Image (cartoon, grey):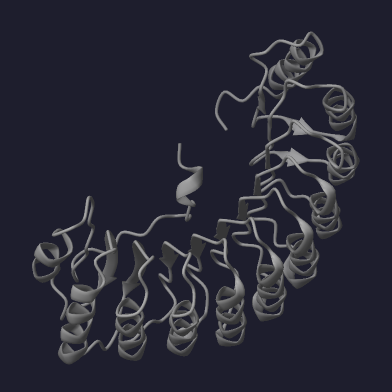
Amino acid sequence: MEGRDPAKARAQVLNFLQRVSENDPSAEELQHHDVFYDRELMSAITAVIAKSTVVKRLNFNCSHVSSEGVQELCEVLKTSTTIERLYLQSTQIDVDTVIAVAEMLKVNQSINYIDLGGLNFGPRGAVALAEALKVNTALKCMHLDSGFISDDGAEAIADGLRENTCLTDLGLYNNRIGERGARALAAGLIANCSLTFLSLTSNKLGSDGCVAICDGLKSNCMLQTLSLRDNGADNDAILALADLFSLNCTLRRVRIGRVEGMQASTAVTLVNALQQCMTILELDLVSPVLKSDALVPLLTRNAEYVRTLNEQADTKPAREIPLASRE
């Protein structure tokens, strides 16, 4: 990064810790991304956090962070009552450290937001996090994007969702989840009564996996935002979506993206289903047979906001962010 000065950034962190030690009420968030958080610096942070009632957010995103240092921090966070958000995206911590984070989440009662994106912790890390979901009563938002959890990890997370009663936002972008994992998550959604946002963008669900998710949501009365972009949805998936729209009364935003092989008769079925489902505020669906000018008048009748895309539009977000975290 041009202009980067690691020594200066480290000094800023130490200055922040001094302010925390002095109970400066403005020292609510640690956020310095140009720092190498080695074991020594992480130990200093941990020592201050152990005594602090000021700091609420620890943001290490996109920094190199000592795995051993994070494990030490987790021991303190087990009893913390003030830290509300923990950001560890792309910090290069290893899977054992992710497991330590999961163990901390089993007992922590204050953290409501955690970002573990870009850590490639695989199914083993997902299993540990799923066990935490079964008993955690504080966490509202969890990012697991690019964790490469695969179907085995998705099955574990699905088990966690069955027993969890507090998580509202779950990001599973780019996790190599296939049809088997999708079917497991669909079953988990049937039992779950808290999740309102789910991103499965850029996985490997295939049409059958997308159909399974739609079928599972027929019995779910909580989810409001669903993203299935870049998962190979086809005509059958859109028929399943139309069927879901005719039964579900809570979905507000659905993101499918480009659909290959969608038939004109399916477009008619979808529009008819939307006439029954007046809760949809945003539909992101790209198909040559589904023009935006055919949907906008229908969707805007009782909608405060609508975005529809035709075959010329194919803008994709680099990373899905749950609505609850957009401030």
Residue 311 on image: x %, y %: 19, 71
Q: Quadrant of the C terminus?
A: top left
Which percent across, then down, holds residue 25? 67, 13
Q: In the shown orientation, is residue 38 left or right of residue 83?
A: right
Residue at left 17%, top 91%?
265
Question: Is the residue 11 above or below the residue 137 in the image?
Answer: above
Q: Quadrant of residue 164?
A: bottom right
Q: Quadrant of the N terminus?
A: top right
The number of discs equals 0
Task: Please name the residue shown 34% across and 61% down the image.
Answer: 252
Measuring from the top left, give residue 66's x and y in whole percent: 83, 41
Q: Nearer the viewer, residue 131 or 293?
A: 131
Q: Residue at x 9, y 71 (%)?
A: 294
Closer to us: 59 or 56: 56
Decide if residue 120 is on the left or right side of residue 145.
right
Q: Give the camera-side residue of 200 and 304.
A: 304
Residue found at x 66% / y 74%: 158
Q: Residue 68: where, in percent of width, then height? A: 90, 44
